[in-house]
């Protein structure tokens, strides 16, 4: 729910009749359940043979950023696209171009209007990767936000340690 505009956003995977091609559609509803975009929603990622699989979205101050896998596992990349409040696409960006198996993509608000995407990646070993993206589609920190070092980030309990040790 976007508390600033009282909208609820829905991300849908669209496929062709054989389900061999896919794309991504977003739709927005007001608090009464009325659609805010066209009746068909906004096709941000057209149905294509590259098999684009929408996975998550993050609400911004002026629209949503949709994160999706492109390609079939284990040869996937991660992309993002943004639409404004009317459903018009604003930009598209490659989040991770390393061709490998990926899973468990999640996104969320970060700071200073940024979004962050986090996923597991099987490129050399199974690891957790993340990428910050600014509201304009660029990467990295905003000029007023300092970088966060790995030493200052703590995940507790650490799920990878508990998985490996069986605790």
Image: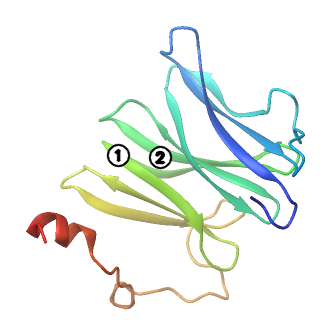
As rendered, which of 14 and 74 lies closer to the eye? Answer: 14
Residue 59, position in %: x, y? 71, 59
- Label 1 secondary element: strand
Q: How many marks?
A: 2
As rendered, which of 70 and 162 lies closer to the eye? Answer: 162
Viewer-side label of 1, 2: 1
User: How many angstroms separate mark 1 from mark 2 (CA)?
Assistant: 8 Å
* Residue drawn at (47%, 46%) of the image: 78
Disc on the earlier residue, 1 or 2: 2
Residue 125 versus residue 101 in the image, above or below: below
Q: Is residue 160 visible?
A: yes
Residue 127, position in %: x, y? 26, 60
Is the residue marked by circle 2 packed among few (<14), some (14-19), or many (20+) residues within 10 Å? Answer: many
Residue 102 is tagged as 1
Residue 55 versus residue 148 in the image, above or below: above
As rendered, which of 91 and 73 lies closer to the eye? Answer: 73
Is the residue marked by circle 1 packed among few (<14), some (14-19), or many (20+) residues within 10 Å? Answer: many
Q: Which residue does the numbered mark 2 point to in the structure image?
A: 78
Q: Are marks 1 and 2 in contact (CB under 8 Å)?
A: yes
Q: Is residue 17 left or right of residue 120?
A: right
Q: Quadrant of the C terminus?
A: bottom left
Q: Is residue 124 left or right of residue 49?
A: left
Residue 158, position in %: x, y? 27, 75
* Residue drawn at (40%, 87%) of the image: 149
Residue 22, position in %: x, y? 55, 24
- Label 2 secondary element: strand
Q: Is residue 124 left or right of residue 70?
A: left
Residue lying at the far left of the rendered structure: 165
Q: Is residue 96 left or right of residue 165?
A: right
* Residue drawn at (18%, 55%) of the image: 125
């Amino acid at each position: 729910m976007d508390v600033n505009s009282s909208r609820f956003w829905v991300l849908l995977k669209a496929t062709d009749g054989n389900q061999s091609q896919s794309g991504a559609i977003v739709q927005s509803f007001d608090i009464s359940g009325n659609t805010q975009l066209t009746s068909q929603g906004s096709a941000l990622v057209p149905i294509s043979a590259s098999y684009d699989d929408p996975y998550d979205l993050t609400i911004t101050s002026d629209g949503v950023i949709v994160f999706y896998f492109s390609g079939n596992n284990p040869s996937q990349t991660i992309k993002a696209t943004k639409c404004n409040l009317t459903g018009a696409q604003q930009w598209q960006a490659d989040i991770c171009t390393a061709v490998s198996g990926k899973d468990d993509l999640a996104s969320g608000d970060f700071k200073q209007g940024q979004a962050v995407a986090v996923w597991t990646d099987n490129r050399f070993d199974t690891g957790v990767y993340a990428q910050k993206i600014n509201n304009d589609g660029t990467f990295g920190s905003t000029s007023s936000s300092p970088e966060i070092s790995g030493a200052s980030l703590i995940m507790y309990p650490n799920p990878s340690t508990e998985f490996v040790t069986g605790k």
